[in-house]
Image (cartoon, rainbow, N blue to C red):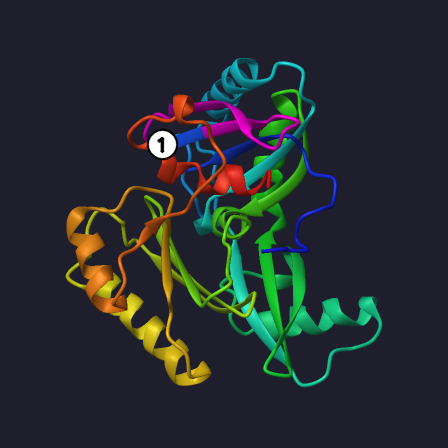
Amino acid sequence: MNLKFLHDRRPHVACEFSSTRIVVARKAENGMIDKVFVQSLEPGSLVPDLSGTNLADGSAVRALLREALAAVDGTTRNLAVVMPDASYRLALVDLDVLPERQEEIEPLVRHRLKRSLPFDVDKSRVCWQTQLVNGKTLLLAGAVLRSVLDEYEAVVREAGCSPGLVLPATLASLRLVDAEVPTALIRLDPTTTSIVIVHNRAVVLVRLLDNVSGAHTENGKLGDAIYSSLMFFQDTYGAKVQKVLISGAAPSAALTSEIAELAGIRPQELAAAVPVHLLSAHQPFILGAVCGSLA
């Protein structure tokens, strides 16, 4: 997908932060990922949150980031930064009329987001992408509290780099989605699970589940959320999801079977252009966001 959240000139090195690990990747001139670094964080070092402190142990996160950057590309000064979904909010905003002047759009988006955000939108950074869906304007909007964003940008600068691009993990992963057919992306994370449906190359559904891990289904909550999302899409757009992609973590066999039964198709791994020799048994699933930010 061609997401305008991303600049035309993107960094060639990216880092993804999560509650359990740091993932850093470098893109070579041929467009392939040629270096990958994955390292676990000490529990409690990074606690994703929409409004509270995220980097509980900033020195530990900074030290690991410096180690990762040295291992992948010791000369980079411009870094794509991927934040946890739990620290950033994505939403869809439908508009009857889109203002012609760009400066008139942001106040409108902020006003619409104010109803749904659990933090002060006036203290947030807001961005959006205009989408045309069935003849109507549907904005894909993102918001992050400035104090939270400052934490991640500060640790990157302290590690000797400039945050040239910052976006949440699900949005980064969407860069790798080839949505020629209705496609569901399920992003599994230690603290959240995101469900996104793309139709006619537009994001038409965004759902974030807190405290639902991809390792288990929380008494069917994840399965229920997936099923209701698929049914909402089918009822609203008169089409069925034809592809299901998984990113963030490898799903359990039970979850894979449940998704296959609910969707009628077997889920696939979100593919990234990474040489086989750089991959371990578990890395393909966790590289979607960091590679997507470099796509």
Is 120 rendered above or below residue 134? Answer: above
Q: Residue 110: x percent and y percent?
A: 66, 68
Tell me if 97 is positioned left or right of 196 in this view: right
Residue found at x 35% / y 33%: 20
Along the line of sight, which residue is nearer the eye, 4 or 189? 4
Q: Residues within 10 Å of mark 1 (few under 14, many from 20)?
A: some
Residue found at x 58% / y 53%: 144
Along the line of sight, which residue is nearer the eye, 113 or 256? 256
Magenta region: which residues? 23-43
Tell me if 6 is positioned left or right of 118 in this view: right
Residue found at x 50% / y 27%: 24
Q: Residue 206: x percent and y percent?
A: 46, 65
Residue 287 placement: quadrant: top left
- Give the amino acid at mark 1: Gln
Q: Is residue 35 magenta?
A: yes
> Majority secondary structure of the magenta segment?
strand
The residue tagged 1 is 283
Q: Is residue 33 magenta?
A: yes
Q: Residue 228: x percent and y percent?
A: 30, 74
Viewer can see residue 231 = yes
Viewer can see residue 53 = no
